[in-house]
Image: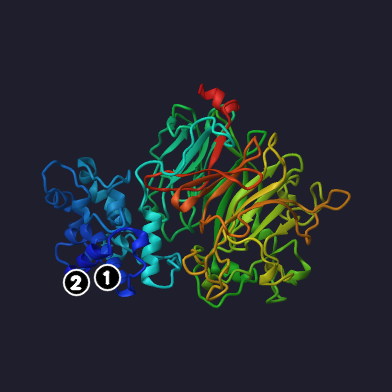
Amino acid sequence: MNIPTSRVDGILRTKGRELNSQSDMTDADAEAILNRMRWQAGTLFRALDRNGDGVLSPAEIDAAPDVLRTLDADGDGYLGEDDLGGPTDIPGMVRRSGIVKVLDLDGDLVIGPEDIAEAAERIRELDTDQDGMVTQRDDLPPQGAGFEFRQPMGTPSQTLRYQRKIFTRAPGLTGPLPPSGRPGVQPGYLLIHEVGDRGDMQKSQRTFLMDDQGQIVHRWYTDDRHPEATVAYLMPDGNLLKTSCKQSWIVMDGKFPIGSNGWVSIMAPDGTVLWQWQHFELGHEALHHDIELMPNGNVLAISYVVIPVEEALALGWRQQRARARIVLDKVYEIRPDLETGATETVWEWSTRDHLVQDTDPALPNFGDPAENPELIDLNWPKLGRTQFNSGQLFHLNSVSYNAGDDLILLSSALFSEIWAIDHSTTTEEARGATGGRRGRGGDLLWRFGNPQTHGRGGPEDQVLYWQHDAHFIAGGLPRTGEILIFNNGMRRSAMGAPEPDQICMGMITGAYSDLLEITMPRSRDGALQIAQPPEVNWSFNADGSHALYSPFMSGAQRMPNGNTLMCQACDKRIVEVSPAGKVVLDFRIGGPGRLFRIYKFAPDAPAIQALGL
């Protein structure tokens, strides 16, 4: 790659680093900066590639520790960001390199003597085809290798502005963090569970409680990874229920869609792992996104299920683009045993059992989606025009349980819908269309958000856009049992998107996020009415006036005083609003990483009392 270094350095000097000062940046300027950062990210690979052939041979990998020691300019035994190719115009971008990621496991951009000594073994993790060699593509894959992921900014300058926005973090708290007792704010402790970004460039493994003054009052320490979309829940007894990942994401990249993790744990307040369940088989199944603690102590968990494309075709799936695999979703209910460490699977539900297709009457599941709204049209997603999927059809990103109705609520981002299913079924009944309290087995009892998915509406009828954290409001809170949704707004053409199917980050279309609180429609006998829209009881930012926007992740929670707390995931912004829609709290948490969810616990909450705070 021939990058005009003097030209790029000149651009950096004259343009500066502030996001808002880049309005006059040309695409040529931006492309030069982006290319420069790609070049810097490949520093370690070029150093290890002694013959310059673009491939690290077994001998070159074996020699990695000695070569890396020669890069230690000050001889202190450590490689810092300067030695790794940085600093870059976007902090931490040298971690685009797979070699940097597997050596810098804690994400602090410092590679120590132990990391260097283990360099050959760790670099071999990048050899996913097991041919003994690591290529430039293994180290620095094109953005989207195996994922169809690309920054949908439209131009290089828009891409650069967006990347600067999400990767640049203030070192501490910013914004009006209020003192304890400020009127209108729900007193309590925030559970902060930081996660990495998709590429693990902005890595974080922190989980902690923060008080009203912004002070950390309790931490949970772990060696596990927190890839994007891992979650943590504080249990009433003070233990922590969380998801995590043991594998390096660079190894998983391309094997599963975004959000994969594979592990569920219960941790004591001191960090001791009391119970752990692994559900991860590379290329076959992996837990992802959300879990839900049930009143009986069981846990609901979502899992990706990868099937060969031949199986998908036999189900009636039809797409123009050739693929090696398709990814479906499954829900498990598991029973943890903290005394023995065992895990029992007590219930299952799979999307595969509730599909409809109208392409081939000779294949299973044939029917008209409009006449079968209780089934899921597996040909609705247009995978060639949708990002973040890697062949997945649904992208379930949240699971919630209502004990009173024995219902499970699922959020499908790719369908831009939420689905209600009956949990009162047996596993066998959940595979079919009969049985359970409602007599409808595992078929959908209700769906909402995008009637286009089942032929009962057009684009003008769509309400949800890549939504997250759809959940039943917990008992004891205002509007218990109603549904609260963080409606991200990605793909919402607020100002007219170039293409309806384009996922937009807001730079082009002016997309915005909003919150909805809804009541599911029921008949007089209490049965859910699948074809009816809900009643919207409350909303925030429905007109896009509050500059609230996160294209992915994010969540919300109802507070005891009636306020609603939310997080804007991509820049770690936390906002609290009153029932009247007044913003009473608005600040950001500095440092690397993102927030998938946010939770606040009142001072008298059992979990807080159990921790002795």
In the rendered image, residue 199, in percent from the top left (x then y), is placed at 39, 56
User: Of 395 and 206, which appears nearest the observer?
Assistant: 206
Q: Mark 1: which secondary structure?
A: helix
In the picture, measured across the screen, residue 80 lies left or right of residue 142, that is: left
In the rendered image, residue 380, in percent from the top left (x then y), is placed at 63, 70
How many labels were placed on the picture?
2
Q: Mark 2: which secondary structure?
A: loop
Alpha carbon distance from label 2 to label 1? 8 Å
Residue at the far top: name it.
Answer: 612
Do residues under tags 2 and 1 come within 8 Å of each other at their CB atoms?
yes
Determine which residue is flagged by label 2. Answer: 4
In the rendered image, residue 386, in percent from the top left (x then y), is placed at 53, 68
Q: Earlier in the sequence, mark 2 or mark 1?
A: 2
478 is higher (above) or lower (below) than 555: above
**Image quadrant in which you'd find residue 565:** top right
Q: How is the image coloured?
A: rainbow
Determine which residue is flagged by label 1. Answer: 32
Please name the amino acid that badge 2 sits on: Pro
Q: Is residue 355 visible?
A: yes
Q: Residue at x 71, y 75 (%)?
A: 362
In the picture, measured across the screen, residue 418 lies left or right of residue 22, that is: right
319 is higher (above) or lower (below) than 376: below
Q: Residue at x 41, y 49 (%)?
A: 196
**Image quadrant in which you'd find residue 327:** bottom right
Q: Residues within 10 Å of mark 1 (few under 14, many from 20)?
A: many
In the rendered image, residue 274, in percent from the top left (x then y), is placed at 50, 30
Please name the amino acid that badge 1 sits on: Ala
342 is higher (above) or lower (below) than 583: above
User: Of 569 and 102, which appears nearest the observer?
Assistant: 569
In the picture, measured across the screen, residue 238 lies left or right of residue 440, that is: left
